């Protein structure tokens, strides 16, 4: 095997083993899954780095408006339904009664804030956020996206921008994403507050919430530790 391909193959094997262990843990009850990788999490700011491992881990903590099922079909996540009102206008209904991990309620304000934050020059996913156009609040659980031009893959772009809490970011002076290129450190570098199945606490420890079964269709009881 080509020497450059070996680390990639090892990562794939490791990921497969981790997935198998996770399934076993769910069947056997509460278990601890210890997982290692030759790579490392770059940051907990979901917009700072567009890197596979970082995105995968942050994707357990933060959620997008639209998700994907096991067949990679687009499915509701934080948005329960969407409608293309016109070629350049989309409307989305948000899931009610969603809470961030610290108990703050998720609303349309967070959607507007998240898209604007994600298109900041320091963001690694600004190209996706910019493709969503201008986000407007219709009511606390409804948003509209006014596009500058027709976007045939609008829903795919909406499935790539994770939602953050506006008030939490304002409280911790993190209205803008961490500028990774300048080695900037923000509160969001080592802290996270999402709506996803895993919550992050004490720096490098996550706990998986069984309430995620409401959206994923299966129970979860996995804790993960990083040392």
Image (cartoon, rainbow, N blue to C red):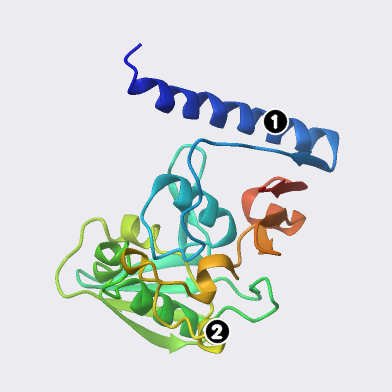
Disc on res. 172: 2
Other-residue count near label 1 (Cα within 10 Å), few / some / many at <14 / 14–19 / ≥20: some
Which percent across, then down, holds residue 78? 53, 66
Comparing 16 with 179, the one in front is 179
Q: In this view, does 17 lie above or below 169?
A: above
| Residue 193: image location, x then y, percent | 60, 71
Residue at 63%, 32% in the rendered image: 18
Question: Would residue 220 be visible to someone looking at this image?
Answer: no
Q: In which quarter of the image is residue 7?
A: top left
Q: Is mark 2 on a helix, strand or loop?
A: loop
Residue contact at pointers 2 and 1, CB within 8 angstroms: no
Point out the image quarter for the N terminus. Answer: top left
Quick one: which residue is furthest to the left in this view?
A: 149
Is the residue 104 above or below the residue 11 in the image?
A: below
For residue 206, above or below residue 115: above
Percent across and percent down for residue 89 are 26, 74
- Depth check: 172 or 113 in front? 172
Left or right, 111 with respect to 201, comes to left
Name the mark on residue 21: 1
Work out how far the residue at label 2 is from the one at label 1, CA to CA, in angstroms. 36 Å
Task: Looking at the picture, tell me which residue is in the foreground, 19 or 44.
Answer: 44
Residue situated furthest top in the rendering: 1
Q: Which of 183 and 19 is in front in this view?
A: 183
Residue occupying the point 67% across, 71% down: 101
């Amino acid at each position: 095997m080509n020497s450059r391909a070996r680390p990639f193959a090892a990562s794939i094997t490791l990921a497969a083993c981790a997935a198998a262990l996770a399934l076993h843990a769910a069947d056997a009850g509460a278990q601890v899954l210890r997982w290692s990788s030759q790579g490392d999490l770059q940051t907990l700011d979901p917009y700072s780095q567009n890197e596979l491992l970082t995105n995968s881990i942050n994707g357990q903590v933060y959620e997008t408006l639209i998700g994907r099922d096991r067949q990679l079909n687009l499915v509701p996540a934080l948005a329960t339904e969407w409608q293309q009102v016109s070629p350049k206008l989309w409307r989305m209904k948000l899931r009610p009664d969603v809470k961030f991990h610290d108990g703050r309620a998720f609303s349309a304000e967070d959607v507007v804030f998240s898209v604007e934050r994600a298109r900041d020059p320091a963001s690694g996913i600004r190209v996706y956020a910019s493709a969503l156009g201008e986000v407007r609040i219709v009511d606390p659980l409804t948003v509209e996206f006014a596009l500058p031009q027709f976007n045939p893959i609008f829903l795919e772009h909406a499935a790539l921008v994770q939602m953050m809490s506006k008030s939490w970011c304002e409280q911790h002076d993190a209205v803008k994403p961490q500028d990774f290129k300048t080695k900037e450190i923000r509160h969001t570098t080592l802290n996270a507050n999402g709506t996803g199945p895993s919550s992050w606490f004490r720096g490098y420890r996550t706990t998986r919430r069984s309430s995620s079964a409401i959206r994923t269709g299966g129970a979860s009881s996995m804790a993960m530790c990083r040392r």
